[in-house]
Amino acid sequence: MFIYHKIRLLQGMIYRRICRVLPVQMNIINKMNIFLDSKYAISHFAEIFASRTYYPGIELFKNPPRGVLDLGAGEGLFTLLVESHMRQRFPGAKVKYSLYEANRQLIAKIKDNIRFAGLFDGVHIYCGAVGERSGEVDFKICRELHCSGIRPLDQVVRVLRVSYLDVEKNLSADSLPVPELIKIDIEGSEVDFFENYIDLISKTCVVVVEFHQANTSLDRWHTIVSKSNLQLYEVTAQSGPTRCEIFVNYANLNRHNLCLS
């Protein structure tokens, strides 16, 4: 058994290095396929689909959210996780998705994943940073790609100059609904987003966020979050200074879930 386990680990290590030319195809549900073609894609898939980090926030909805905001979209897998739930629980639901990713290298991959999943309509993809409403910032590409961000904790290998995007302005310009589900994984900029978008966040129902305690104390963080009328629902994961939390605006969520339209 020990030798078999070691062989399996070796096979996995080898595959992670050749998956770029021999990607694995994951069929999530009918006509929703995801191709894993890099170590980052495998790691991202495991975080999104193979853990319960985000599931509890999605399952709080008894009616489909009209709008979903995916901040720090990576390869777009959180959007596909939500869409897979919608297709199974609310067939025919038309959800509007807004994805933000500052690493321009990942935009093409997001578009590929969206296309392979058969999700063509109702998706808006934006390349830029979020947190502040305007200006520019250095976006650091890390050795571990999923750790890249404005305030990363991992080793930086390259720096990109990116523009901040105004999320509310884009929602209005593209005639998109106020997002009722927001996912935030922006590697240390979550405090900036909460401080600059209090009004928008106060209108949502559920926020799932990856919080990085290295930059802000937990007490201060929860004080900032409470200004948007959110309450902590569950801590779904924790690793070192990083924890994944789900926050709920119960008044908004109850109103949404009672809506029959």
Image: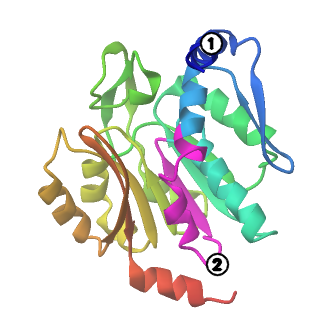
Q: Is residue 122 above or below residue 214?
A: below
Q: CA distance from mark 2 to mark 1?
A: 46 Å
Expressed as whole percent of the image width and height from the top left, the position of residue 153 reads 27, 27
Q: Quadrant of residue 67?
A: bottom right
In this rendering, the answer to whether 10 lies above or below 57 is above
Residue at 65 percent of width and 29 percent of height: 109
Q: Position of residue 42 (x, y in %)?
A: 60, 28
Q: Is residue 132 visible?
A: no
The N terminus appears in which quarter of the rendering? top right
> Who is closer to the viewer here, 46 or 215?
46
Residue 49 sits inside the magenta stretch: yes
Q: Nearer the viewer, residue 256 or 245?
A: 245
Look at mark 2 in the image and give the residue it sits on. Answer: 63
How many numbered markers are drawn? 2
Which quadrant is home to the C terminus? bottom right
Task: Sort mark 2 into few (<14), some (14-19) or many (20+) by Cα contacts within 10 Å.
Answer: some
Residue drawn at point x = 75 percent, y = 21 percent: 23
Q: Is residue 110 magenta?
A: no
- Magenta segment, which residues? 47-72
SS type, badge 1: helix
Q: Secondary structure at mark 2?
A: loop
Q: Earlier in the sequence, mark 2 or mark 1?
A: 1
Residue labelled with disc 1: 7
Q: Nearer the viewer, mark 2 or mark 1?
A: 1
The amino acid type found where label 2 is placed reads Asn
| Amino acid at pointer 1 | Ile
Q: Residue at x 31, y 37 (%)?
A: 135
Farthest right residue? 31
- The image's colouring method is rainbow
Q: Position of residue 118 (x, y in %)?
A: 82, 46
Q: Is residue 68 visible?
A: yes
